[in-house]
Image: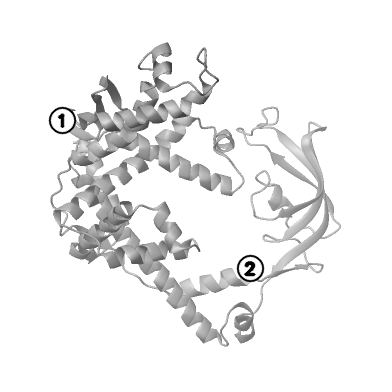
Amino acid sequence: MSLKSSNKVAANRFRLEVAVDADEFEKAVEQAYRKENKKITIPGFRRGKAPRKFVEKYYGEKIFYDDAINSLYPGALEQAIREANLEMIEDKIDFDLVSAGKDGLVFNATITTKPEVQMEGYKGISALKKPVSVTDKDIDDEIARVQDRNSRMVTVEDREAQKGDITMIDFEGTVDGNPFAGGKADNFSLTLGSGQFIPGFEDQVEGHKTGDEFDVTVTFPKDYQAKDLAGKESVFHVKLHEIKKKELPAVDDDFVKDVSEFDTLDEYKADIRKKIAESRETEAKDSVDNQLIDKLVSLVQADIPEAMFKNRTDEDMRDFEYRLRSQGLNLQTYMKYTGMDMDGMRKQFRPQAERQVKMRLALEKIAELEAIKPSDEDVEKEYGKIAESYKTDVEKVKKLIARDDLEKDIAVEKAFDLVRDAAVVTEGDPDSKKENEAKDEAAGAKD
């Protein structure tokens, strides 16, 4: 097998002329004969026993050519692409048979390749890092959340219902004296102040005691989903069976021992402060990374084939569907719930796909420009990390992930490390910067 010629015929499209020598083609034809002969019947021979020359004479010399070509084509094309030093992406391949016979096989294949990328200005990118601080209120808020998780419900008997209480009620609603569908329930649990019911309903339950029966008068919103009730006044007869409130545990050393591995409140607060600070530091660094990625994406100069965006969109949608299935859903059910169709889903995933494609092209080009190549130690370490994360044997991982692919991934990571290390990061709020840029852009558009 050999590459006879490689010619660029359009942006990111190359036509390769590929040759397979006579011996290789003959072996492929012989293999096709042995595979198909079991199905062939020739007069005078038992099924599968006719010599090849008789089969070819009876059905034609080229009877096995298609199978032979199909078996040789993938490997021959792959080798030709390597010889041409091209990187093909998944897209339409135009195949054209030039010749096939005793002299071998020759075919043309027009493929789509990765684009040529120009990258400048990737060193010294400026970014803002949000300052990290933790206040006493942050710590108190976190403790309050833990208190809430460890609260218990107690029955209230010595006062009226108030906002925040959970009430157990029966109710029946009427409009113009007539009951309506969905207007009645027994032993319904309603948290006052939750906004679960029509505006005004919960306010009128407040102030009543257990055992009270009373009427609540409300008006349905004009945009209420049940059109026959929209904008109408309704009277609900309510019976209040029970009032419960949330009782929070006291915040002391005993509380700390119950909810953590610490013995004192001071130790617990110090740990909360540390964890909040670490979390915010991670968020701040992630924000810097996102700013750097946005800049890298904007620096990419390339005529990117549409197929790359399409393929990445498809991949992201498959990943999303896999996550849905792990939650007991599928893509069709999700689209039904959200009112989307497949075109809508693709439009939703497209911007993310474009960003990912451009980011990868940018980092691959940087790795090339900076001659970044992972060491054997880097590769083995990465294989080990993957094996550990999936709780499997390293050798199994090596069979599943090609070394070349892993080396490219590592090189891309190192390229981003280089961009990050060379970036000019100053303290500031990136969100405020984006907001100011958006205002400036809007003002410029008006001018």
Q: Nearer the viewer, residue 434 or 262?
A: 262
Task: Give 336 or 268, whichever is nearer the viewer.
Answer: 336
Residue 143 in the figure: left or right of residue 176: left
Looking at the picture, how far across and down is residue 263, in whole percent? 58, 87
- Residue type at mark 2? Arg
Q: Residues within 10 Å of mark 1 (few under 14, many from 20)?
A: some
Tell me if residue 70 can be seen. Answer: no
Relative to 248, does residue 190 appear above or below in the rendering?
above
Q: Position of residue 212 (x, y in %)?
A: 84, 55
Relative to 162, is 350 above or below? above
Q: Nearer the viewer, mark 1 or mark 2?
A: 1
> What element does badge 2 sit on?
helix
Q: Amino acid at mark 1?
A: Ser
Q: Which mark is residue 436?
A: none
Residue at mark 1: 5
Q: In the shown orientation, is residue 169 left or right of residue 359? A: right
Badge 2 crowding class, 10 Å Cα cut-off, few under 14, some 14 to 19, many 20 or more, is few
Disc 1 secondary structure class:
strand
**Looking at the picture, does residue 10 appear above or below residue 162?**
above
In the foreground, 15 or 352: 15
Q: Which quarter of the image is occupied by the N terminus?
A: top left
Check if mark 1's residue and mark 2's residue have beta carbons within 8 Å: no
Label 1 and label 2: CA atoms lie apart by 70 Å
Q: Which residue appears at 60% of the width and 33% of the height? A: 223
What is the x, y in percent for residue 66? 37, 22
Q: Which residue is mark 2?
A: 149
Where's the C terminus, which quadrant?
A: top left
For marks 1 and 2, the one nearer the N-term is 1
